[in-house]
Amino acid sequence: MLRAFRCDLHIHTCLSPCGDLDMYPRTLIEKSITEKLDVIAVCDHNASENVEYVLTLAKGRPITVLPGMEVSSLEEVHALALFDDLRDLIKLQTIVYEHLPGKNREDIFGPQVIVNERDEVEGMNERLLIGATDVPLRDLINEIHALGGLAIASHIDRPSYSILSQLGFIDPETPFDALEISAAIGMKQARRQYPELSAYTFIKSSDAHFIRDIGREFSTMILQTANIHELKLAFEKREGRHVVEGD
Amino acid sequence: MNIETIVKCLDLNVFSGFDRLKTEVLDGYTGDLLSDVMANSKEGDIWMTRQVHQNIIAVASLKDHAGIILVHGAEPAKDTLEKALRENIPVMGTNLSGFEAAGRIYNILKEKKDATATPP
């Protein structure tokens, strides 16, 4: 049976240098459930160490967590990678780390904290997660697809690190599964602003870096169940699945 | 002044647009954000960038740039080069930094302009 799912496919944790320290797995899950979200994806910058703890906490709770990552391409375009299985995300993680130079400077970029399901600090990620990989965008999308994941362009309306700011326009051959618009503009405005992108499905996400941001934006999707296959059907508007665009 | 002058002065590698090196260069632009280059560069500009994605060819074509110079040893990505060859857009490369390349080209352009403004 098809029904409406409230989906926020872009939430950071305290692992992202710019993520608030209060964004640890438990607070993130509790706030997401309070906001009646049905599906969330945890997407830290170029990293994923907190995903397993969020998955653990989601067990038996009325929410589905998709393992994800926000990867920065060679062109410094941010793209979301979403998976069903944590193991596929870890495969992408291996590739990302092979292509991500530099070490973090906490005093400049912020701490990158790994927190487990018992709210304990497991350690720090020492890599320069705020940086960019040297993987060209097209190769990155192909890699995500090869691992069975979905590739979504992050916040296309934002003036930094979006495909439109970095690359000027989206070649219709670019095989993104969907494009994300930020909390800054509504769906109707986005459709008015980007008529040339009418072939792409748009989604809204919170891109939350603070607990208070969770729930501020999400997309309602008509699905049978919450998984990558169903999301793909919704992005392709097939078999009754779709994204409700709203305002 | 045409592209060929710049190629000689800066000892540039030419990747594509070999028969278009007589194209007149009117001014220059530097930028890696294609949204910015699309908004602010002008026809006849020689464009210096580190961006090697194939969209640079479309931007140079759209804006009628004289050509593109990839700085700091950057080389066009495979699909970028194919597109540049197909559309016959001059793409050059240099090991100079963007700062140095732009500085040198600025001086050459200025010299030529001054020379035209006040003939000896």
Image (cartoon, rainbow, N blue to C red):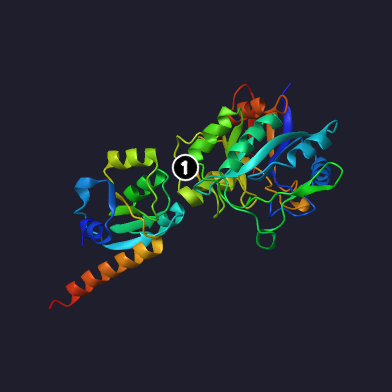
Residue A149: name its quadrant: top right
Residues A5 and A189: in front is A5
All told, the count of numbered labels is 1
Q: Quadrant of the C terminus of chain A?
A: top right
Indicate the amino acid at tag 1.
Ile
Q: Is residue A209 above or below residue A90?
A: below
Q: Is residue A155 left or right of residue A115?
A: left
Query: Residue B1: where, in percent of width, then height?
Result: 21, 62
Query: Residue A94: where, in percent of width, then height?
Result: 62, 37
Residue shown at the point (31%, 58%) measured from the top left: B46
Residue shown at the point (59%, 24%) measured from the top left: A238
Residues A102 and A243: in front is A102
Q: Is residue A243 left or right of residue A59?
A: left
Residue shown at the point (40%, 60%) measured from the top left: B97
Q: Is residue A224 left or right of residue B61?
A: right
Residues B97 and A40: in front is B97
Q: Is residue A145 above or below residue A116?
A: above
Residue A228: name its quadrant: top right
Residue shown at the point (50%, 52%) measured from the top left: A165
Residue highlighted by disc 1? A170
Residues A107 and A224: in front is A107
Could you say whether the residue bearing mark 1 is in a helix, strand or loop? loop
- What crowding class fits label 1: few (fewer than 14 Cα within 10 Å), some (14-19), or many (20 or more)? some
Q: Quadrant of the N terminus of chain A?
A: top right
